[in-house]
Every structure is written in C-alpha cells, then in structure tokens.
Amino acid sequence: MGQLAGLPRDVINRANEILLELEEHAPTTAVEPSRLDTAQQMALFPESSPILDELAGLDVNSMSPLEAINKLYEWKRRYADKTEQK
C-alpha cells in the first residue's frame, strides 16, 4: 500500500493496526462517543521507541552542534532508512 493523502507509511500502517483492533473489540450496539471511557483511547504510536529511549539518555546541553548533527544523521541512517525500504 502506498501513501494515503501524503501520510507516511508508518502512520497508515499504525492506523490499520488500530482499526483492526477496534473492529475486533467493537460493541454490538452503538455507543455515543461522549459516553466512552477516556481510558479506551488508543495511542497512535507506542509510548516508547529506541530513539526516544536514547534521546532521554543524552545530555544535549553538553553536546556540540557537530555532535548533535552526527547523532541525527546516525538515527536517520539506523531508523528512517529502514522504514523507507519496507
């Protein structure tokens, strides 16, 4: 499946996952959205990711601009290039 309305493939894939899960657990009768428990709200993306975990451990205040650019390049090479190949 290609892009839909210019959305990245990861967003479309995650939306499809959420749709399938919602369809599996759909109530047999209609429920007003205002009556749904807010805890039922699903996250669009996982709350944790390798980049976020690594970012939390970085001391960005001590990094030079060159170190920061190199880190971004490394993340792009490790993560973004993999998703483009799918």
Image (cartoon, rainbow, N blue to C red):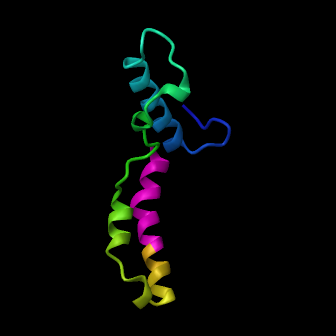
Instruction: Name which residue lies at 54% across and 21% down.
Output: 32
Q: Is residue 4 above or below residue 66?
A: above
Q: Is residue 12 above or below residue 63?
A: above
Instruction: Name which residue lies at 51% across and 87% down.
Output: 65
Please tell me whether residue 59 belongs to the stretch shown in magenta: no
Quadrant where the image shows the C terminus? top left
- In magenta, the rendered stretch is 72-86
The x, y position of residue 27, in whole percent, is 42, 14
The x, y position of residue 7, in whole percent, is 61, 43
Between 29 and 44, the one lying in front of the other is 29
Between 58 and 86, the one lying in front of the other is 58
Between 37 and 5, the one lying in front of the other is 37
Instruction: Name which residue lies at 43% across and 43% down.
Output: 43
Please tell me whether residue 80 belongs to the stretch shown in magenta: yes
Left or right of residue 6, residue 33 in this image: left
The x, y position of residue 37, in whole percent, is 43, 32
Quadrant where the image shows the N terminus? top right
